[in-house]
Each structure stands twice: as structure tokens, then as C-alpha cells.
Amino acid sequence: MSQDLATTAEGIEQAVTAFVSKRVGADVPADQDLFESGLVSSLFAMELVVHLEQAFSVQILGDDLKRDNFRSVQAMTALVLRLNGAEQPADA
Amino acid sequence: MPELPADAREFVDDLVGDRAAEWDLAGLIPDDVLRSLATRGLLCAEVPQASGGLGVSSAANGEFTAYVGSRCSSLRSVMTSQGMAAWTIQRLGNPQQHAEYLPKLAGGQLAAVAFSEPAAGSDLSAMTTTIEPDGDAVVVRGQKVWTTAAHYADMIVVVGRYGSGAAAVVVPASAPGVTVTRVPRPSGCRAAGHADVRLDDVRLPASAVLGGGQPLMLLVTTALAYGRLSVAWGCVGILRACLDAARHHARARQQFGRPLAQHQLVGRHLANLLTGEQIATRMCEHASRCWDSGSPDMVVASVLAKQVSAVQAAQGAAAAVQVLGSAAAHEGHAVERAYRDAKLMELIEGSTEICQLILSDHAVSMTAR
Ligand SMILES: Cc1cc2nc3c(=O)[nH]c(=O)nc-3n(C[C@H](O)[C@H](O)[C@H](O)COP(=O)(O)OP(=O)(O)OC[C@H]3O[C@@H](n4cnc5c(N)ncnc54)[C@H](O)[C@@H]3O)c2cc1C
């Protein structure tokens, strides 16, 4: 993952969209609710966690594992941006 | 990545020796055996060095898990629980909690993980244990069953409902309100210290809560991912022990004027055992590689490895009993233990059927290759 991809909102959103779309075999709009649409199983949710960590060199621990952070491509993008910006993993 | 200490296997050999049968019959592993492995960090060798652990790869720890499993599945079960507790704390805990708990787990304390309840076996969504905030504290109430290693554990990682989601909470076994009652005479992994754990208004500081508010099934999937791969490697160990016993016996024992191995129907058992051991090993190696490279495939690969290895181990152990004949028909014999232990591996951490359901879901949802 290049520096831009890992740091700009568009770059992150594109990369996450590509991963999710490939995994579910359909185009996934960035604001689509993945849980409501039944696209995400618990297994896939954990795959998303591991993918985001690996692709963007972040650690998603504890409180950041909540469902809302994975609800949509937009939510995941916001999570990655926040974790990338923060010095320490947010865990409060 | 750091390597396991070069003498890790020798250390296990010295500790276990030929005592696994004795432990199986007694239903207990001596405390000093567990403590000396725990003190060296060998029961959860993947805990990062920064947290006081050995920090070895999943692949290295997997091979070590298989080695322990080939000697004693009860000891390997304790290892699985310890590693799963550490992984759950690593995954769900914050940095303060990592600092609080992980060095203890890598340094001599023992842990167990409790999901199952009387009415929540395969269907963990039926869990009723609650973790309720109360000021600076939380109160834990519920009944857990079949918690491996709980009899030995200093801390029990308990999964329960928390608000509209779930959390795990680290419960000291000595906390007021905790009652640990051994499962009487389990049929396999008999010395693994399985116990039912009652939690009667157990009051703990809120800092003992790991995460909190995650969807229950995400939390369960997360914790079980480690347990599944560990069990899978343990099953590789069972297969190796069975293959070894069967091929030695088939070479040495003569019937109808030649070694058993020269009777083709016996040879087929040996071929199947070797095949099973190799299939299970490759599945586990693949899953460990996914873990070590941080691939999202680690989740599915762990389910696959568990599924394949547990089924192969149960079949392989049955074949080994057949090859050994009456030689294996002694309570506590390595192959007889393997037969009892392996079957239980098809029930735990997602039974064979539950793994099949997960895999069928995956098959339906995955994209064409
Ligand atoms: C040796 C051992 C160690 C254990 N260690 C732990 C531990 O450390 N921590 C912990 O929390 N728990 C532990 N357990 C409990 C274990 O996780 C459960 O036994 C397991 O989840 C299965 O639940 P159950 O026994 O209630 O069986 P059930 O859920 O009642 O299932 C019985 C049978 O029905 C099948 N079945 C159920 N639902 C379905 C379905 N939808 N479709 C098809 N088949 C289905 C199952 O596959 C199984 O074959 C342990 C159990 C054993 C035996």
C-alpha cells in the first residue's frame, strides 16, 4: 500500500471498496450498510479487521472493534484515518 | 521472528516422559509441570516479546503445539486455553490491559476461556451470562460449563453480554462469587482440568473488562480463531503419535508368518494415516502462514484447518486402534488415549457440523476464483 493510499480519505476509501467488493462479488457503494444488507458474516467482519490492519499498518483493538466502525466502507475509512492520525491506538 | 528456545522440545520430553498415561488415569497434570512450562512462556509462545512473551510465529508455535499434542492431548489442551486467553486479551484489550495481563500469562500464571453454558453450546448466541457496569465496577453473573483448564487457572476469561453487545472479562479464579467445579471423569483429554464455572455476583473493577459492546459473534469468532488453529495443530500431533505407533507395531508384530505391514489391508490403514497426517499438516501450515503474514484469509483458513484436522485425527486414531489390535486396548495407552481425545476435538471450538455450516456460508458468499 503506497503512502497516499494509506493517508488520504479517497485512497483509503478506494482500497477498502475494492477489497469489500471483491470479497462479496458485487459493487458496494461506500455508504451501504454492510450488516443490514446481510453482506457481512462474523467471519467476514474479522477478515475486515485483519485486512485493514495489514493494508494500512494500524492496530484495531478493544473498543475500536465495535460494529459501527465496520458498518460501511465510509465508516472503515474514518476508522483508518483516525488510527493513522493518532499517536497512540485509541482505546479510551 | 524470534525462534522457540532450542531446548523447548527436550524440556517437554523431560516433563512429560512416559507419564501422560498416568495423568490420563488420574485426571490430573501435576501443578509443577504446568507451572514450569508457563513460567518459560511456552504455553502461549506467540505473546509478543514486548509483553514479556517469546513472540514466536504461528508456524513455530503450531509445530510446537503438535509436538506437545503428540505426547499428551491434555497438556496440549491447557496450552490451547492459555494461548486463546492471551490472544483474546491481545485482541480485545487496551495497552494497559496488555501490560497488566500478558506478562503474567507468559510468566507462570494459568488461564482458561469460558464461552459455553448449559443452554449455549453450538449456539453461543443463546449465552445468558451478563457483565453489568456498576459505577467503577462490573458485576458478572452466569454459569459456564466445560471450561478447559479452569481447574488449574488463576484467571478465567469469561465471555458474556454487555449492554446491547458483548464483552470478555478477566475473572480471577479466587474472586468472591466464583465457584469452579470439576467435570467428573471426562471421556477424553481427561487431565485438562475441565470445570464448570459459576459466577454469583462477581464484582470486579471495570478495568477487567476487555472491549465491551462488540457484537457477540464477532467477539466469539475473534477469540475462537486462535483456539481453532491451536486445536488443529494439536490434532496433527495426535495423528503423528498414531502414525508412529501404528507403523512400529505393523513392522514388529507378525501374524500369518509375516509382519502386519505386509498384509495389504493393514498397509492401507498405514497409508491412510500418513495421508491424514500430511493433509492436516498442510492445512495447518497454510493457516499459520496466513496468521504470520496478517492475511485476512487467516479466519477461514483456521476454520478449515480445524475442520480437516479434527476429522482426520478421529479417523486416524480409529485406524491406529485397529492396527494395534489388543495392544492398544489398554486404558491410557497412547493410541487408546488418542482415540478418546481425537473424537472430542470434533466437538469443541465449533463442532464438525458447525465448522461445515461456517464453510458452507463461506462457499456461498465467496467470489469465483
Ligand atoms: C473436551 C471439551 C473441552 C471443552 N472446552 C471448552 C472451553 O475451554 N471453553 C468453553 O467455553 N467450552 C468448552 N467446551 C464446550 C464445547 O465448546 C461444546 O461442547 C461445544 O460447543 C458443543 O456444544 P454442546 O456440547 O452443547 O453440543 P450441542 O450444541 O448440543 O450439539 C450436539 C450435536 O448437535 C450438532 N449441532 C448443533 N447445532 C447444529 C446445527 N445447527 N446444525 C447441525 N448440527 C448441529 C453438533 O454439531 C453436535 O454434533 C468443551 C467441551 C469439551 C467436550
Image: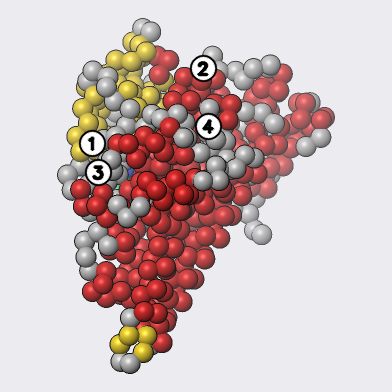
How many angstroms separate mark 1 from mark 3 (CA)? Answer: 16 Å
Q: Is residue B324 above or below residue B129?
A: below
Q: Which mark is residue B196?
A: 1
Sequence-wise first label, 4 or 3? 3
Q: Which mark is residue B73?
A: none
> Residue at label 4?
B53
Q: Are marks 1 and 3 on the same chain?
A: yes
Q: In terms of image quadrants, where is residue B35? A: top left
Q: What colour scheme governs how the chains and residues are painted in the rendered image of this protein?
A: secondary structure
Crowdedness of circle 1 by 10 Å Cα count: few (<14), some, many (20+)?
many
The chain to which mark 1 is attached is B
User: Could you tell me which residue is drawn at 19 percent across and 34 percent down?
Assistant: B181
> What x and y, as percent, mark residue B148?
31, 41
How many angstroms separate mark 1 from mark 4 (CA)? Answer: 29 Å
Q: Identify the amino acid type marked 4.
A: Gly
Q: Identify the amino acid type marked 3.
A: Leu
Sequence-wise first label, 1 or 4? 4
Q: Is mark 3 within 8 Å of ligand 1?
A: no
Q: Are marks 2 and 1 in contact (CB under 8 Å)?
A: no
Decide if residue B214 is on the left or right side of residue A79. left
> Residue at label 2?
B96
Q: Are marks 1 and 4 on the same chain?
A: yes
Name the secondary structure under disc 2. helix
Q: Nearer the viewer, residue B296 or B95?
A: B95
> What x and y, as percent, mark residue B240?
44, 63
Q: Which mark is residue B28?
A: 3
